[in-house]
Image (cartoon, grey):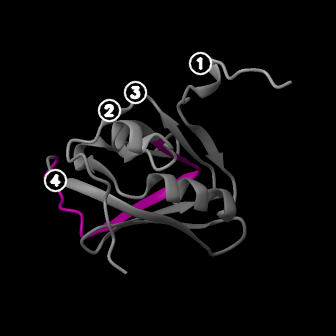
Amino acid sequence: MTDDARFEDGREAPLNLGALDSDDLAVISSLSQDAVFPASEMRWHRKGARFALLLNRVRWEDDGKTRHGPERVQSVLMFNNVRAVASQGVPKGDADTILSLLSITFEQTDAPSGHLILTLAGDGAIRLEVEAVEVTLKDVTKPYVAPSKKLPHHPE
């Protein structure tokens, strides 16, 4: 005889993931796809060699979308071992600009060093020069119903 399901078994826990290589990074990239954030929510702590974003990410992992509609959640995306930051297509001085993250990739230069490339919608990009891949994605709020009540769609 099997045990009955319990309410606690169905709870959806916040994400707290880490990436130390390209394979791990692909998971974080897919979970961060279509996250939006104001330019004011980017921080580079040069002395601490960290770059962080406060994202409003789509909960792609949520199996309950049909039950309650698409959700977003605020998450911190943290990059460690960052030596330099550069950007293209990101307006300087306009903290209210809303950016949309499409993907995160790693281009190795001199193992284990390389560049983490954050590709943004509208031809923007942020390049982080890193000593090694060390990335975390952590949900920091409860999920909320996406204001559009729709999932982002990318035509093929």
The quadrant holding residue 103 is bottom left
The answer to whether one can see residue 27 in this image is yes
Task: Give the amino acid type for the residue marked by disc 3 in the picture.
Answer: Thr
Measured as percent of width and height from the top left, residue 45 is found at 43, 41
Q: Vertical placement of 153 versus 41: above or below?
A: below
* Dot 4 or dot 1, earlier in sequence: 1
Residue drawn at the location 25% of the way across and 56% of the way down: 99
Q: Which quadrant, please, contains the N terminus?
A: top right
Q: Which residue is mark 2?
A: 144
Task: Give the amino acid type for the residue marked by disc 4 in the picture.
Answer: Thr
Q: Which mark is residue 7?
A: 1
As for residue 149 lying within the magenta part, the answer is: no
Contact, mark 4 vs mark 1 (Cβ under 8 Å): no
* Dot 1 or dot 2, earlier in sequence: 1
Q: Which mark is residue 141?
A: 3
Contact, mark 3 vs mark 2 (Cβ under 8 Å): yes
Say which of marks 4 and 1 sits in front: 1
* Dot 2 or dot 4, earlier in sequence: 4
Measured as percent of width and height from the top left, residue 81 is found at 59, 50
Residue drawn at the location 55% of the way across and 36% of the way down: 15
Q: Secondary structure at mark 4?
A: loop
**Which range of residues does the magenta coloring cover?**
77-95
Residue drawn at the location 65% of the way across and 65% of the way down: 113
Say which of marks 3 and 1 sits in front: 1
Q: Secondary structure at mark 1?
A: helix
Q: Secondary structure at mark 2?
A: strand
Task: Give the amino acid type for the residue marked by disc 1 in the picture.
Answer: Phe
Q: Is residue 12 left or right of residue 39?
A: right
Say which of marks 3 and 4 sits in front: 3
As for residue 82 lying within the magenta part, the answer is: yes
Say which of marks 1 and 2 sits in front: 1
